[in-house]
Amino acid sequence: MAIVTTMRPLVSLALPEKGATRLMTQLLLAIVGTLVLTLSAKTRVLLGPVDISMQTLAVFLIAAAFGMRLGVATLLLYMAEGAMGFPVFQGTPEKGIGIAYMLGSTGGYLAGFVVMAAIVGWAADRGWDRHPVKLFNAILVAEIIMMAMGFAWLALLIGPEKSWQFGVVPFIVGDLIKVALAASLVPAVWSLLKRS
């Protein structure tokens, strides 16, 4: 029988050991995480006809730094903020707000962010965030699942051909760059911490 080893993600270095202070620190980190997600959603890189946000990179980094529990909790808080009508998503408020926006063309991708955070956070909890190749593989799997969820939802709305053409293809190169960047940054931080 294999023993599952759980290691501590980066954020554990800043968390108090237990008690109300730990809970308050986690809540504060989750709120800061939602602000980072909002800023990353509003930060766009223009690559021809399609704008690419920095949001997937933010999800990768938050999940890798926070671990699965706090990472998923942060994403769920972010989704709750969006559902309540706060303009936290890339197309809000211009393209709508709240649940109506979340059930629109980006709905599958938004749900995929939560799954992505769970996968990357799970990997970080097992120490994969210290190894670029292992972390790259976990983030790539998370990216593929998120894109599949986004594609499937969008295909229900506009058909599979248009969904592939407008919802997947334009993002492949940019998202692969973000996967590689996240898989490099987090282990680099661990390396710096080991030296100090």
Image (cartoon, helix red, strand yellow):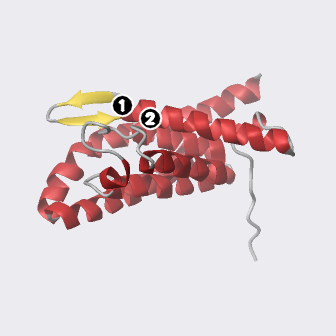
The residue indicated by pointer 1 is 42
Question: Neighbour class for label 2 at 10 Å: few (<14), some, many (≥20)?
Answer: many
Residue, x 28% and y 63% (percent of image)? 153
Coordinates of residue 4 in the picture (x, y in percent): 73, 65
Say above or below: 185 vs 116. above
Coordinates of residue 177 in the picture (x, y in percent): 37, 37
Instruction: Tell me whether the residue at label 2 lies in contact with that at label 1, contact meaning CB atoms closer than 8 angstroms.
Output: yes
Identify the image quadrant of residue 31: top right
Q: Which secondary structure, mark 1?
A: helix
- Amino acid bearing label 2: Thr
Question: Neighbour class for label 1 at 10 Å: few (<14), some, many (≥20)?
Answer: some
Is residue 69 at all visible to an observer of this figure?
A: yes
Asked whether, in this view, residue 138 is left or right of residue 110, the answer is: right
Residue, x 43% and y 40% (percent of image)? 86
Coordinates of residue 132 in the picture (x, y in percent): 55, 42
Q: Which secondary structure, mark 2?
A: helix
> Where, quadrant-wise, is the N terminus in this rendering?
bottom right
Residue 143 or residue 35, whichever sits in front:
35
The residue indicated by pointer 2 is 38
Residue 52 or residue 178, whichever sits in front:
52
CA–CA distance between discs 2 and 1?
Answer: 6 Å
Residue 114 or residue 78, whichever sits in front:
78
Is residue 131 at all visible to an observer of this figure?
A: no
